[in-house]
Image: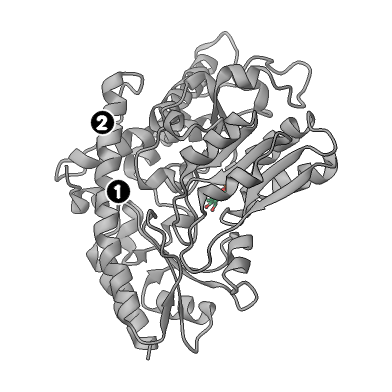
Amino acid sequence: MKLNVAAVRACYPALADGYAYLDGAAGTQVPVSVIDAIARAQSAGLGNSGGEFPASRRADAITADCRAAVAALTGGDPAGVILGPNMTTLTYRLAGTLASGWRPGDEVVVSRLDHDANVRPWVQAAERADAVVRWAAVDPATGELPADQYRELITERTRLVAVSAASNIIGTRPDVAAITSLARDAGALSYVDGVHATPHGPVDVRALGADFYATSAYKWSGPHIGAVIADPALLDSLRPDKLIPSPDEVPDRFELGTLPFASLAGVSAAVAHLARLADLPDTPAEGNEADVTAPAFRERLIASMTAVQRHEEELFEVLLAGLDSLPGVRTYGRAASRTATAFFNVGGKTPQQVARHLADRKVNVWNGDNYAWELAGALGIRESGAAVRAGLVHYNDSSDVERLLSAVAELAG
Ligand SMILES: Cc1ncc(COP(=O)(O)O)c(C=O)c1O
């Protein structure tokens, strides 16, 4: 299957503003079907959850659909999908909950590849519990996070291993399955940050061996919602702080206050949209209806996300070769397996100057460490403003790449 990129782009009203949106790693645009789903949910009338009247039932049905959609996207169990405002908030919450069982001398393993949202919550929780933090290192030359080092890092005292499924700045996809397997063998839990990985290809939380898998819908064409996927039985063994009268069942126990129901309808529509990407008609007449619980739906999603991955890889080859061919341009990261995320500097210019120049040429990119604080330090560029990130997602096309390359060429040399 091949993406019809023109048809994909036609689903996104925001892309009509003439900018090349290479900022998808920080948040994607949303298709009409997501915008419509949110508007429809609000228009239909929404009550709070758990009531006896139709508007409340609609809110509960939206929440259940959303859990099922996120489970279909990640290969998880709907009963183990925790919903919340974003990954960072959910991770702090789970770190606090898990750390309440840690004892002095227990150990936690974090990595220098990760976004700080999968580092600091664990480091701070460990400090409070007098637990020891052990660090997995990145090879700065290649950007790899070698899985072998975890044989030394994980001990019988390890309680948790936090690792990213893909770096948000250099795209490295570590061997997560090998790392989580070492954690499991030692009786430790694994917390996998899938925020950057999820939009770039098929995800199977079971194959990854992740006890917890975190993702954020706004990175894959949805609204600003985060989710953590876990085995409901594992969640059942945990006692987060909560209000006495709020639901005590799993996964609701982990969700604080009222969920943003209209946005959750948008999340389900985003998953339905991803599943359709590989066979969109030429006209952007998208329906929303999809039975996300049908086995065929997950198969379609996998086929669609496989096509997305191929599309991004093809474009990325051109993008990376183009950047590498420009004099004075330095790109970071050479991992064998990586997402289509470029991180680069232009000699004699600060990352901010480059980003501003690109914005003047109608190219959206990010500059800075993008919260990959430890990795920017390991690459030795944190203090100098880090670098410029240009990331590809399913709706980017060759004209976006060409515009980036010709705008960077104006500065290079
Ligand atoms: C890899 C990665 N992890 C975590 C986060 C934090 O996600 P959220 O904004 O949902 O808290 C981001 C956001 O950019 C990210 O790219």
Furthest residue toward left: 282
Give the residue displayed 19% in from the left and 54% down from the top: 6
The C terminus - image quarter: bottom left
Residue that badge 1 annotates: 309
Return the disc, 1 or 2, that comes first in the chain's sequence. Answer: 2
For this view, does 284 lie left or right of residue 305?
A: left
For the residue carrying disc 1, how many other residues have a C-alpha within 10 Å: few (<14), some (14-19), or many (20+)?
A: many
For this view, does 203 lie left or right of residue 159?
A: left
In the rendered view, tell whether residue 3 sits above or below residue 335. above
Q: Label 2 amino acid?
A: Arg
Percent position of residue 297, x then y:
29, 25
Q: Distance from label 1 to label 2 (Cα)?
A: 14 Å
In the rendered view, tell whether residue 39 sits above or below residue 9. above
For the residue carrying disc 2, how many other residues have a C-alpha within 10 Å: few (<14), some (14-19), or many (20+)?
A: some
Give the numbered dot on residue 363. none
Percent position of residue 288, x then y:
30, 30
Residue that badge 2 annotates: 300
Q: Nearer the viewer, mark 1 or mark 2?
A: 1
Label 1 element class = helix
The N terminus - image quarter: top left
Label 2 element class = helix
Looking at this view, is 242 or 295 the one in front?
A: 295
Report whether the residue tagged 2 is closer than 8 Å to ligand 1. no
For this view, does 144 lie left or right of residue 12?
A: right
Q: Label 1 amino acid?
A: Gln
Q: Are marks 1 and 2 in contact (CB under 8 Å)?
A: no
Percent position of residue 241, x then y:
77, 27
Looking at this view, is 82 or 332 the one in front?
A: 332
Give the residue displayed 66% in from the left and 26% down from the top: 254
